[in-house]
Image (cartoon, coloured by chain):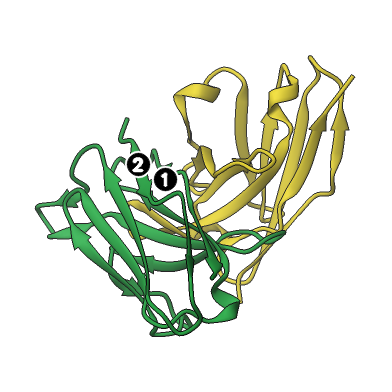
Chain colours: A yellow, B green
Amino acid sequence: QVQLVQSGAEVKKPGSSVKVSCKASGGTFSSYAISWVRQAPGQGLEWMGGIIPIFGTANYAQKFQGRVTITADESTSTAYMELSSLRSEDTAVYYCARVAWFGELLYFDYWGQGTLVTVSS
Amino acid sequence: DIVMTQSPDSLAVSLGERATINCKSSQSVLYSSNNKNYLAWYQQKPGQPPKLLIYWASTRESGVPDRFSGSGSGTDFTLTISSLQAEDVAVYYCQQYYSTPLSTFGPGTKVDIK
């Protein structure tokens, strides 16, 4: 059974960076694709970007270009999402999700438990 | 970018009654080469991550009760809960993955018990 376990909650100052991890178990990590989705308090889901670890290349939503970096470490089956220049509007729960991948990135079939990032001075 | 909209924003349905949620994409998500609609539905209960219900617009994920069904093609889609149960209270999101690797979600529809 695929399981994605994320790192714990973070409190950050405006202007700083945060790095959230997502450790996968079950299945073969090299055959995964991982996306990151965030959800501000009381709001909907927002796709931020994703990566196919075996290729190592990431794609990002235009809104986050230049501020987000998604990486993956195959040796530890862990994906990372780093968001820089944090502002209060970045306060949200950040989810990683496994992307069903059959030659193309499809739907999100497994999700991590979420990591609350709070940006506050 | 493909923009997803949903209607209604919220609805309240009596237990055992039908709930219908609509999702519309700003452009077709039907891929002509394989005749598949690149559209998924998710359920999110309070304090939990989203859960995949439906993919390819109408294929139910393993373990999802058959009271959940998806339909539609092109730009207009529907999620139907045929007989609402108490455990179905949640927010439901549609998602397009046609513009893969980019993806977008609808704003969500909240379902409550009347």
Q: Residue furthest left?
A: B32
Marking on residue A109: none
Quarter of the image where the C terminus of chain B is located: bottom right
Residue A19 vertical placement versus B81 (above, below): above
Q: Quadrant of residue B104?
A: top left
Q: CA distance from mark 1 to mark 2?
A: 5 Å
What residue is drawn where x is 51% and y is 41%?
Answer: A50
Q: Chain of mark 1?
A: B
Whichever of callouts 1 and 2 sits on the residue coming sooner in the sequence is 2
- Cβ–Cβ under 8 Å for marks 1 and 2: yes
Q: Which residue is mark 1?
A: B106
* Residue that carries the numbered disc 2 in the rendered image: B4
- Please state which of residues A58 and B23 is positioned toward the viewer in this rendering: B23
Q: Residues within 10 Å of mark 2 (few under 14, many from 20)?
A: many
Q: Tell me residue B39's x, y (percent).
A: 31, 56
Could you tell me which residue is drawn at 66 percent across and 56 percent down? Answer: A77
Question: What element does badge 2 sit on?
Answer: strand
At label 1, which amino acid type do we have?
A: Gly
Give, as a three-letter code, the residue at label 2: Met
Residue beneath the point at 43% across and 45% down: B105
